């Protein structure tokens, strides 16, 4: 991460296009090479808790994408004005404001999902990914880059959430987004939904499996672990 | 035997380096060393190569399990005909059980060995016979009514996530067979608990006798300790339960064999039994005086007889890889397993068989126990050094 910041400082003064190669890289990195969950191992708690079904997982990912990108943007805009000693408080205020927006929108327009997500919307505040990105990236980079980084990190988080939720919903309830995908004939032949998939530990197995698959494909990651 | 040896030697060059089937070298090696003690000699330094290698050790465990398996087969038939109130000869009982049990064993071996072979070929490590034992333990710990695809799933899961992911045989920090059972228990609760212990496939012209209950002693004692069967029938094994765990007598035969051959650690077996007894005894002292049928009043030695306490102590807790390694550590490990199993049994009716979870839990703790024992030892010896 230090590298990125240094480079950011070096690039100062040069005009660069909005979607330059480097910016695309910032956006894409968290999806694979620097995934918040599988590589940085942040934000595991909500990945275990809200991945039983795809719908809440999708909504929560969208909420986290919103909060990470805009908190990164706002903090980056204010980065020169924030005294170092009180930066955590300032970050928290910004994040809390954004989370409150998400919470109220959910309550207003999707009450049933909001009830299902319950405390986890409020807990976005304490999601380690957000604070991690603010500390590591937004405080030392320009607003546009920070915004992209927030977007990417949120998307990387959402990707894992959706993959895990897809497995858990297919094998745990035989559905995707509430629609039956495992045909009835399977059940007639003696197939049963896997009860373990309804329990949080299964998400741990699945994330572990994902990390395994990711590292066997992407050998770059093997050295740093 | 000469014929087999000739055949093996004949086809061997194909699998060696440069041969046509070089890729399958480790698969071939697995079969060859299973049949014959390998003739390899050590080339560097001074080593003693014992012909009593891992494969021979594993085969000893298989031998120790045979009494349990045979009795289990008989008991499957016995329980089946008992539920229908039919008079049958022991031979008929055994035949029925063998027909029902053999597919489970075959599926368990095929599923797990397939994963093991794939990984051995992919990662180029030799196939060890760890799965010979695991593949036999899995059927013995399951009820006979388990659907075959679940057995296969358990076998695949435990080989993949219990063993291969950590580097294969000898690297697993949990007992793979128990892991398979725990996985199935949590994944398909309806098939691993409740009234599923007796095969109730219909018999023409007979119906299930009145008063038949599918509840095992383990479930019964949680509600009323007088509801369990007599100690002798629990000892000999005329009760419902998983295929291999009903007869404490057969398990003790296996234990004697394991201890005599030095394969199983007597320290662990003994201390699991002692731990269970002590905790049962403490429970008796603390039991509510007003309620004489409360589970805490169960005589301590009955904890040895019901469920699969003995089976877990002899075949599961002694797994040399996942157990503690230091002698003192083995005592602590065993005592904790026994004590914790009884606590789970008595206080948590949702998980009737505490020994499974207890062993898995202390498998995880075993390295910590070893570490503490070694540290303590160093501390003690350092005093003499100063």
Image (spheres, coloured by chain):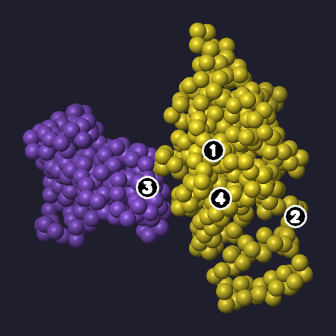
Chain colours: A purple, B yellow
> From the viewer's perspective, is residue B208 above or below residue B211?
below
Q: Are marks 2 and 1 in contact (CB under 8 Å)?
A: no
| Residue A4 in sight in this render | no
Which of the 4 quarters of the picture holds residue B354? top right
Per the image, the residue denoted by label 2 is: B51
Q: Which residue is rendered at x = 84% and y = 45% of the image?
A: B253
* Number of the front mark, 2 or 4: 4
In the picture provided, is A92 more to the left or to the right than B321? left
* Number of the front mark, 1 or 3: 1
Q: Which one is earlier in the sequence, the residue at label 2 or at label 4?
A: 2
Tag of residue A192? 3
Per the image, the residue denoted by label 1 is: B83
Subunit bearing disc 2: B
Subunit bearing disc 4: B
Q: Are marks 2 and 4 in contact (CB under 8 Å)?
A: no
What SS does tag 3 mark?
loop
Query: Which residue is outermost to the front?
Result: B205
* Number of the front mark, 3 or 2: 3
**As rendered, which of A80 and B229 lies closer to the eye?**
B229
Could you tell me how far apart the alpha carbons at marks 2 and 1 are, in whole angstroms?
49 Å
Q: Which one is earlier in the sequence, the residue at label 2 or at label 1?
A: 2
């Amino acid at each position: 991460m230090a590298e990125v910041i240094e480079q950011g400082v070096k690039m100062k003064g040069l005009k660069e296009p909005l979607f330059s190669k480097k910016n695309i890289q910032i956006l894409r990195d968290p999806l694979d090479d620097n995934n918040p969950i599988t590589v940085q191992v942040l934000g595991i708690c909500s990945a275990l808790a809200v991945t039983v079904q795809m719908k809440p997982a999708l909504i929560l990912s969208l909420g986290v994408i919103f909060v990470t990108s805009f908190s990164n943007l706002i903090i980056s805009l204010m980065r020169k004005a924030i005294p170092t000693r009180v930066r955590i408080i300032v970050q928290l205020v910004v994040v809390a404001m954004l989370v409150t927006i998400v919470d109220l929108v959910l309550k207003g327009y999707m009450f049933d999902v909001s009830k299902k997500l319950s405390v986890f919307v409020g807990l976005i505040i304490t999601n380690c990914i957000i604070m991690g990105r603010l500390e590591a990236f937004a405080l030392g980079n320009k607003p546009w880059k920070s915004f992209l980084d927030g977007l990417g990190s949120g998307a990387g988080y959402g990707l894992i959430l959706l993959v895990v939720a897809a497995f858990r919903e297919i094998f745990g309830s035989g559905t995707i987004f509430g629609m039956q995908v495992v045909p009835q004939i399977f059940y007639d032949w003696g197939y049963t939904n896997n009860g373990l998939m309804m329990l949080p530990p299964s998400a741990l197995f699945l994330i572990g499996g994902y990390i395994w698959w990711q590292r066997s494909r992407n050998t770059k990651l093997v050295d740093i672990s | 035997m000469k014929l087999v040896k000739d055949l093996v030697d004949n086809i061997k060059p194909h699998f060696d380096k440069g041969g046509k089937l070089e890729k399958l070298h480790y698969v071939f090696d697995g079969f060859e060393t299973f049949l014959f003690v390998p003739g390899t000699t050590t080339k560097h330094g001074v080593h003693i190569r014992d012909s009593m290698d891992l494969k021979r050790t594993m085969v000893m465990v298989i031998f120790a399990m045979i009494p349990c398996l045979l009795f289990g087969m008989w008991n499957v038939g016995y329980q089946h005909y008992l539920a229908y109130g039919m008079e049958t000869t022991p031979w008929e009982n055994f035949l029925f059980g063998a027909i029902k049990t053999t597919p489970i064993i075959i599926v368990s071996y095929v599923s797990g060995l397939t994963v093991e072979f794939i990984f051995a070929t992919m990662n180029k490590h030799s196939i060890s016979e760890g799965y010979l034992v695991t593949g036999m333990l899995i059927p013995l710990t399951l009820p006979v009514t388990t659907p075959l695809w679940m057995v296969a799933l358990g076998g695949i899961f435990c080989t993949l996530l219990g063993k291969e992911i950590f580097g294969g045989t000898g690297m697993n920090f949990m007992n793979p067979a128990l892991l398979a059972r725990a996985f199935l228990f949590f994944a398909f609760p309806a098939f691993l608990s409740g009234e599923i212990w007796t095969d109730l496939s219909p018999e023409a012209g007979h119906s299930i006798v009145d008063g038949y209950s599918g509840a095992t002693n383990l479930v019964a004692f949680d509600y009323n300790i007088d509801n369990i069967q007599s100690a002798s029938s629990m000892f000999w094994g005329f009760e419902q339960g998983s295929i291999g765990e009903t007869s404490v007598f057969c398990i003790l035969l296996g234990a004697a064999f394991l201890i005599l051959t030095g394969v199983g650690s007597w320290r662990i077996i003994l201390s699991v039994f002692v731990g269970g007894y002590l905790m049962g005894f403490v429970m008796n002292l603390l039991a509510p005086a007003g309620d004489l049928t409360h589970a805490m009043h169960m005589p301590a030695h009955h904890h040895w007889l019901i469920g699969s306490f003995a089976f877990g102590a002899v075949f599961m807790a002694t797994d040399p890889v996942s157990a503690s390694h230091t002698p003192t550590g083995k005592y602590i490990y065993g005592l904790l397993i026994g004590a914790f199993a009884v606590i789970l049994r008595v206080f948590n009716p949702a998980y009737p068989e505490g020994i499974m979870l207890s062993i898995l839990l202390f498998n995880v703790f075993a390295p910590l126990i070893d570490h503490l024992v070694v540290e303590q030892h160093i501390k003690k010896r350092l005093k003499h050094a100063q």
